Amino acid sequence: METRNIINALAALAQESRLAVFRLLVQVGPEGMAASKIGEQLSIPPSSMSFHLKELSHAQLVSSRHEGRFVIYSANFGTMNGLIGFLTENCCGGNAVCAPAAVCCPQTA
């Protein structure tokens, strides 16, 4: 990942509601969740939810798709794994003892 993308992702996650949204979407996996349901589960009003999802999308941490009248959001595991890799690539000076865990979820289209 490029440094600019890393900074954008970390900045997006440096806000309590956005971090909660992203963690929830990671938990539900590639199938994702409707924006309205995310808001209900996290008690975030629709106008705020729209803003937070836009910020996460801009940072390429989530993607969206339409299913009928719903917009379904899912975590972008490729970006997440790239961020984790960037943060851990030089852990312990590259000593294999500190090797990061395997990546989460295979990338989905």
Image (cartoon, grey):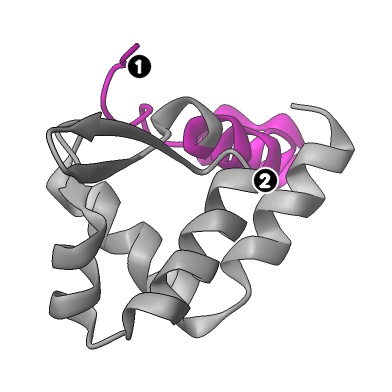
> Badge 1 local density, few (<14 within 10 Å), some, or many (20+)?
few
Q: What label does residue 34 carry, if any?
A: none
Q: Are marks 2 and 1 in contact (CB under 8 Å)?
A: no
Q: Position of residue 47 (x, y in %)?
A: 43, 78
The amino acid type found where label 2 is placed reads: Leu
Q: Is 75 left or right of 43, judged from the image as shown?
A: right
Is 22 within the magenta? Answer: no
Q: Nearer the viewer, residue 18 or 84?
A: 18
Residue to which mark 1 is pinned: 107
Give the camera-side residue of 106 and 59: 59
Residue 9 lies left or right of residue 69; in this view the side is: right
Counting residues from the start of the chain, the first of labels 2 and 1 encountered is 2
Q: Is residue 68 left or right of residue 4?
A: left
- The residues colored magenta run 80-109
Numbered mark located on residue 87 in the image: 2
Residue 1, given in percent of the width and then of the height, sits at: 74, 26
The residue at 26%/26% (across/down) is 105
The residue under the point 67% across, 45% down is 87
Identify which amino acid the numbered label 1 is placed on. Gln
* Vertical arrangement, residue 25 with respect to residue 45, above or below: above
- Tell me the CA gap for discs 2 and 1: 19 Å
> Label 1's element?
loop
Dividing the picture into quarters, in which one does residue 13 lie?
bottom right
Q: Residue at left 54%, top 69%?
A: 51
Q: Is 61 situated above or below 67?
A: below
Viewport quadrant of the C terminus: top left
The answer to whether 42 is drawn above or below residue 92 in the figure is below
| Residue depth check, mark 2 versus mark 1: number of the one nearer the observer | 1
Q: Residue at x 35, y 66 (%)?
A: 21
Q: Quadrant of residue 76?
A: top left
